[in-house]
Image: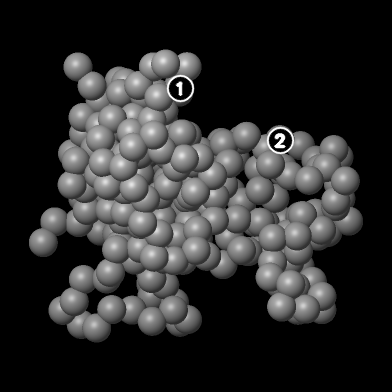
Amino acid sequence: MGGKSDIKPLSASSRASEPSGKPSAPAGERPAPLLELVGVSKSLSGKRIIDAVDLTVRGGEILCLLGPSGIGKTTLLEIAAGVARPDGGRVVRRAPASLLFQDDALIPWLDALGNITYVLPRAMGDEKAGNVALEWLDRFGLRPEVFPSAMSGGMRRRLNLARTFAADRSVVILDEPFAFLDDRWGGVIAGLAAAQAAGGRALVVAGHHLPEMLREAAGERLLSASVESQPIRLKHPGRPS
């Protein structure tokens, strides 16, 4: 049997507030899909790990893919972000995407400031890029002059997260964003993810379980899908009408 799963809306005791910035869909209209996977399949070393996945995430939604390690969640996220190519099917991204890799993706010869400015548009200019980077470093409690080699695992994870969010993409894909973080920083990430969705972005989050802090922060914006075996199969996900 494959890992077929249905997408389920999650209830919560609270919702994220709507920040100013990105426009919301007109009242009564569902936001447009920003990310779609249609019939996506993938094999690694001759083994099918993803099979005929249909996946839709709209602006304002957070889709959580939950399952054990080694099931293929990371590969699915990399395909969604455009880092990996599917063997079959197609991926439609209607907006630029940023990806938080499961493994450390920091540039070791750049300090914290340089790691963030590296992903910012050159058209932004050095001064503005530096200011943006400093704002994100401050939000994540990181010093700009520190190099990755001098950071703890939690600090490095926070820098990876800061860089992903600083890229300011409309599709945000997060692979194990709560790994190596204590409850305090986990709460910060949950609130930030909820605020990003409230601002009209589409988020995909992969993990072993759904943190209660994310459930509480995101409220009805949150959808979940459990994948327990290979190959992963998802059919027609998306917020019910």
Give how far across and how far down residue 1 sits, in percent.
19, 17
* Viewer-side label of 1, 2: 1
Q: Secondary structure at mark 2?
A: helix
Q: Amino acid at mark 1?
A: Leu
The residue at the point 54 percent across, 50 percent down is: 99
Q: Secondary structure at mark 1?
A: strand
Give how far across and how far down residue 76 sits, in percent.
41, 37
Quarter of the image for residue 232 reads: top left
Quadrant where the C terminus sits is bottom left
Q: Is residue 132 visible?
A: yes
Q: Is residue 39 left or right of residue 107?
A: left
Total count of labels: 2
Q: Amino acid at mark 2?
A: Gly
| Label number found at residue 17 | none
Give how far across and how far down residue 19 sits, in percent.
44, 77
State the residue position of label 2.
153
| Label number found at residue 44 | 1
Reply above or below: 23 against 10.
Answer: below
Reply above or below: 22 against 184.
Answer: below
The residue at the point 39 percent across, 17 percent down is: 47
